[in-house]
Image (spheres, helix red, strand yellow):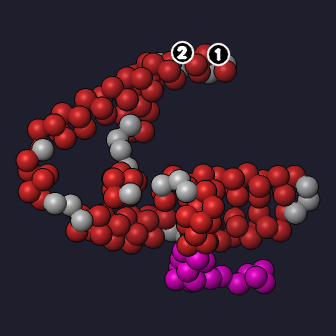
Amino acid sequence: MAPGTSLSVLEISAIFLSITALLTYVNHRFIGLPTTIGVMVISMLLSIGAIFLGFLGFDDLIDYEVSLLDQLDFTEVLLDGMLSMLLFAGALHVNVSDLKRYKLPIGILACLGTLLSTVIIAGALYFVLPLLGFNLSFIWCLLFGALISPTDPIAVMGILQS
């Protein structure tokens, strides 16, 4: 890509969708993990590989990736675009009668699981961060735990379907 040339959101989305499709195929064909987990693991490995290539002097790849990401407005693309479509597609496959029948156990497990996860993450942060030289009050650790604990509904739908 020539300096100063920008790609449209559609072109960037097509690039990322193509990469995701390729990673999904590799996972399905060779690795065999659930789709959401497999794509995430392969993506992390590719990202780590790109970082090591940067250390070896191949900075053009990282510069290109950064220029692609700089062109995106993640609020527009993710929240207004992809997330709404993914949630709608996931909701189409939910059996409402089963959901009504199991609403109490689902609600209890979701609430207690989120609260338990919040406390565990907060406690771990509160005791581990001082070992790394950071002092953070427990309330901030609880806030971080509450932010990170709710389950990703897209990943849950994908795992439950498989």
- Please provide percent x and percent y for residue 128: 58, 19
Residue 120 seen from this side: yes
Q: Residue furthest right?
A: 57
Determine whether the residue tagged by mark 1 lies in a helix, strand or loop: helix
Q: Which residue is mark 1?
A: 131
- Please provide percent x and percent y for residue 145: 41, 31
Q: Which residue is rendered at x = 35% and y = 44% of the image?
A: 151
Q: Is residue 15 magenta?
A: yes
- Please provide percent x and percent y for residue 113: 30, 32
- Please provide percent x and percent y for residue 11: 57, 83
Q: Do callouts 1 and 2 mark residues in contact (Cβ within 8 Å)?
A: yes
Q: Is residue 106 above or below residue 88?
A: above
Instruction: Tell me how far mark 1 sits from mark 2, CA to CA.
Output: 7 Å
Q: Which residue is rendered at x = 42% and y = 23% of the image?
A: 120
Q: Which residue is rendered at x = 52% and y = 23% of the image?
A: 125
How packed mark 1 is, by other alpha carbons closer than 10 Å (few <14, some 14-19, many 20 or more), is: few
Q: Is residue 8 above or below residue 49?
A: below
Quarter of the image where one finds residue 162? bottom left
Q: Which amino acid is tagged 2?
A: Phe
Q: Which residue is rendered at x = 91% and y = 59% of the image?
A: 57
The residue nearer to you, when weighing 44 against 136, is 44
Q: Is residue 108 magenta?
A: no
Magenta stretch in the rendered image: 1-18
Q: Which mark is residue 123?
A: none
In this rendering, would 48 be left or right of 118? right
Numbered-mark total: 2
Determine whether the residue tagged by mark 2 lies in a helix, strand or loop: helix
In this rendering, would 30 be left or right of 95? right
Q: Which amino acid is tagged 1?
A: Leu
Q: Which residue is mark 2?
A: 127
Quarter of the image where one finds residue 147? top left
